[in-house]
Image (spheres, helix red, strand yellow):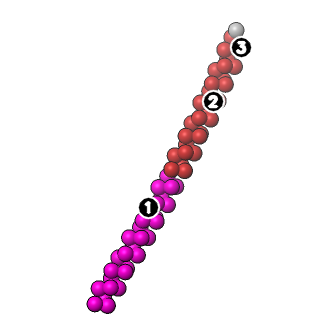
């Protein structure tokens, strides 16, 4: 009975550990996704500024 309890505790702790690892990984991926979205928006703004500047020079 003690062996069964010991194995059950180890398995339970393993699942708890995996839960926190997966949760951390998802948060990390979300942060990376947000950073890439911010970079994309910066690039869009830069391109719009350059286009407006070219249009002003042509006029």
Point 52% across, 46% down: residue: 33
Q: Quick one: label 3 or label 1, which is nearer the N terminus?
A: 1
| Coordinates of residue 1 in the picture (x, y in percent) | 28, 90
Q: Toward which corner of the image does residue 4 lie, by quadrant?
A: bottom left
Residue on which the image places disc 1: 22
Whether 31 is among the magenta residues is: no
Secondary structure, magenta segment, majority class: helix
The residues colored magenta run 1-29
Give the camera-side residue of 20 and 25.
Answer: 20
Mark 2 Cα within 10 Å, few/some/many (few <14, many 20+)?
few
Report how far apart the C-alphas of labels 3 and 1 lie in the structure: 53 Å
Give the camera-side residue of 40 and 30.
Answer: 30
Q: Toward which corner of the image does residue 40 lie, by quadrant?
A: top right
Residue farthest to the bottom, as pictured: 2
Point 37% across, 75% down: residue: 12
Q: Answer yes or no: do the residues labelled 2 and 3 have beta carbons within 8 Å?
A: no
| Coordinates of residue 24 in the picture (x, y in percent) | 49, 60
Q: Which of the two discs, 2 and 3, sits closer to the camera?
A: 2
Q: Secondary structure at mark 1?
A: helix
Residue on which the image places disc 3: 57
Give the camera-side residue of 12 and 21.
Answer: 12
């Amino acid at each position: 009975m003690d062996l069964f309890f010991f194995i059950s505790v180890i398995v339970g702790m393993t699942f708890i550990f995996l839960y926190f690892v997966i949760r951390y990984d998802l948060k990390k991926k979300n942060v990376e996704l947000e950073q890439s979205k911010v970079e994309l928006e910066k690039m869009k703004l830069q391109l719009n500024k350059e286009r407006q500047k070219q249009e002003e020079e042509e006029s």
